[in-house]
Amino acid sequence: MRLVGARLIKLCADEGLVARFDGDEFVGMQAEFDKMSPESMARRLVDLLSRTYIIEGRSVNV
């Protein structure tokens, strides 16, 4: 969950807010969409979260 949270923060850090809501749920808020449309943000989010994670030296995909 920490790795997922870190990736979400990286995506939204400049213009948004990310919070862990409950268990494995996160909430993200984007202040402005001038630079990125909601659809573009969703595509980046799926791409970012679907990348391989390295946990204790092992590759993990979610």
Image (cartoon, grey):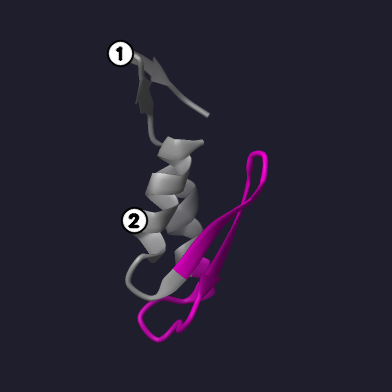
Q: Is residue 30 above or below residue 20?
A: below
User: Of the numbered discs in the image, which one, if any, rests on residue 57?
Assistant: 1
Residue 27 horizontal side relative to residue 22, left or right: left
User: Looking at this rendering, what residue extends furthest in the right direction?
Assistant: 22
Residues 44 and 30: in front is 30
User: Of the numbered discs in the image, which one, if any, rests on residue 19?
Assistant: none
Q: Disc count in the image?
A: 2
Which residue type carries mark 2? Lys
Question: Neighbour class for label 1 at 10 Å: few (<14), some, many (≥20)?
Answer: few
The residue lying at 54 percent from left, 71 percent from top is 29
Residue 57 horizontal side relative to residue 44, left or right: left
Q: Is residue 44 above or below residue 24?
A: below
Where residue 30 sits in the image (x, y, percent)? 50, 75
Where residue 57 sits in the image (x, y, percent)? 30, 13
User: How far is mark 2 from mark 1, CA to CA?
Assistant: 22 Å
Residues 2 and 47: in front is 2
Q: Which residue is mark 2?
A: 10
Question: Which residues make up the magenta segment?
Answer: 17-39
**Quarter assignment of residue 24:** top right
Q: Is residue 35 magenta?
A: yes
The residue lying at 48 percent from left, 68 percent from top is 17
**Marks 2 and 1 close (CB-CB < 8 Å):** no
Q: Earlier in the sequence, mark 2 or mark 1?
A: 2
The residue lying at 45 percent from left, 38 percent from top is 2
The residue lying at 38 percent from left, 28 percent from top is 53
**Quarter assignment of residue 28:** bottom right
Q: Tag 2's secondary structure?
A: helix
